[in-house]
Amino acid sequence: MLLTLQRIPAFSTTVFCRCSAEFLQRHCSRMLSKKVRVSDALSGKETGSNIRIQGWVRSVRPQKDNLFLHVNDGSSLKPLQVVASSHLNTRDLTFGCAVDITGTLEKSINKRQNVELHAQHIKVVGECNPVDFPFKIKERHSLEYVRQFPHLRCRTNAFSSLLRIRSEATTAIQSFFRDNGYVQIHTPVITSNDCEGAGELFQVEPAGHKNDSDDPNPHFFSVPAYLTVSAQLHLEVMAGAFSAVYTFGPTFRAENSQSRRHLAEFYMVEAEIAFTESLDDLMKVMEDLFKAATEHVLSCCAEDVELFHKYIAPGNRDQVDLMLKRKFNVISYTEAIDILKSSSQNFTFSTEWGCDLQTEHEKFLVKHCGNVPVFVINYPYELKPFYARDNQDQPNHTAAAVDLLVPGVGELCGGSLREERLELLSQRLARAGLEDTHAWYLQLREFGSVPHGGFGMGFERYLQCILGLHNIKDVIPFARFSHSCLL
C-alpha cells in the first residue's frame, strides 16, 4: 500500500515575532516547572528544581533590590519564603492576594527556613485590598473576633490549623474502625425516629408546603420526617447482619441556645457491636478509639497542635499526654452521686440519686479522678431511653448505660447495651406509647436477635478536648446554632 504524503504549509514565523521574548520565557517556564504544594516544597525534596506554587500571600516585605514574600496554600502551617527581584513587585501584590509563582527552589542561608523559592515570575491571580480585609498582617486576632467572619476565617493560621487537624482526626477514626473490622454504614439524614426522646427535632417538609386539612396524608413522606438526632436505630438494624458497624456523619438538634456548648448541626461517630453482653466491651472500644485517634493527630499534625497548646490553651499538651498514658477510670452512677454529695462544692443542680448529671457535675468528677477520663456506668433506668438494657436490680433500678467524661468538656461519649429481650422491650415501648411507630424495631428481636450494644462520640467535643478549646463553634468549619446567620 502506498501512502500519499501531502505537503503541510510551514508555520508562519510571524506568529513568533508577535510574542515577546519575555512572554515566551514566562510561559515556557510554567510549562517546564513542576507544580508542588507548599508543604512539599518545605520538605526540601525539590531543592534545585524549577517549581511552581499557587497560594495566598501572608506577608510582603519589599526592599531596594529584593522582594520577600511568605506564601501559603493551606497544606502546612509554615509558609514558603519567596525571594524575587524588586522589579517583580507590583501594586496589586499585597497581603491576602492569590499568586501563581514559578522559580527555583534553593537552600536558604537564613536559619529561619531550610529552603526558599527564588522567583522568576510572579502572577497575581486574585487581588486583595489589605485595608478592607478584616485580618491584618501584624495582628494576632482572637477567636472571638475571627468568629465574626465564617466565610473568611479559614484564611487565619489558627483556623487553617484546626481544619487540617479535623481532617487528620477524621482519617484516624475511619482507619481505627477499618483496622478493627467494622463496616461503615451510610445512615439516613432524614428519619421518622427521635432516638434521644428529647423532642428537639428539625421537621422536614418541601419548600412552600401547605398543610391541607382534607388531605389524608399531608406530609411528603407517609409520616412526619425529621433531621436525624442519632443513627443508632439504623445501626442496630445493620448489627443484625454484621458483627460491628459504624457511621460518621452530621447530626441535628433544635436546641434554642447560643451557648459555647451547643450547635444545631454537628458530627457524630457512632458504633454498634453485636454479640456483646458487657459494658466493658463498649468501654474498651471507646478508650482505644480516643487514644488511637489522638496519637495519630499528634503524630501527623504536630505543628498545628502545638499552635493551640502554645498560644491558645497553654498546658493542655500535658493534659493530653496524661490521658494517653493513664488507663481511664470507671465508677458507677451511684458512686458518682456519693462523690458529689460528699464534696464541699456548692452545685447549681441537684445531686440526689435519680437526677441527671449536669456539666458542672461531670467536670467535677473528672477532676476528682485526677483529670483522667472517667466512665460512669449503670444510670437510673428512668433516665435512659427505651432501648437501654434493664439491669433488673434493686433497690436502685438501673440500666446498662455508660457515659465517658473527659477534662474540659464533660460528656464525650454516651452508650449502652441494648434491650434484646422482646418482652421487656415491648413493655417499655408500650409505656412510652411507641409500640406502633416502632413495630419494626420490635421485629428485629424476633429474627435472629443477639445481645448487642453501642455508643456515640461527639466529634467536635473530641476536638475541644485534645486542643483545649472552650467554644464548640471554634472546631467546626461552619457553625450552625440558634439565630445564627447561614452562608
Image (cartoon, rainbow, N blue to C red):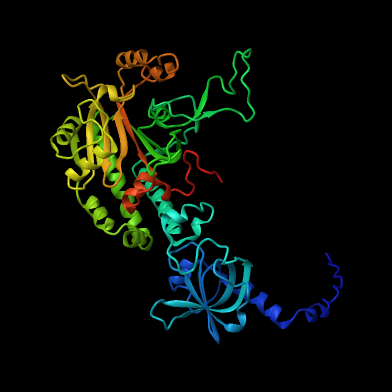
Q: Which of the pair 176/37 is nearer the observer?
A: 37
422 w.r.t. 356: above or below: above
Q: Quadrant of residue 27?
A: bottom right
152 w.r.t. 424: above or below: below
Q: Quadrant of the N terminus?
A: bottom right
Q: Residue furthest left?
A: 342
Residue drawn at x 43%, y 53% is 144
Q: Position of residue 55 (x, y in %)?
A: 55, 66
Q: Quadrant of residue 30?
A: bottom right
Q: Position of residue 135 (x, y in %)?
A: 50, 62
Residue drawn at x 47%, y 62% is 75
202 w.r.t. 476: above or below: above
Query: Total number of numbered labels?
Result: 0
In this picture, residue 345 sits left or right of residue 243: left
Q: Is residue 94 visible?
A: yes
In this picture, residue 347 sits left or right of residue 474: left
Q: Position of residue 256 (x, y in %)?
A: 44, 34
In this picture, residue 212 sits left or right of residue 284: right
Q: Which of the pair 394/18 is nearer the observer?
A: 394
219 w.r.t. 42: above or below: above
Q: Which of the pair 156/278 is nearer the observer?
A: 156
Q: Residue furthest bottom?
A: 65
Q: Is residue 284 visible?
A: no
Q: Position of residue 376 (x, y in %)?
A: 22, 35
In this picture, residue 427 sits left or right of residue 134: left
Residue drawn at x 64%, y 28% is 208
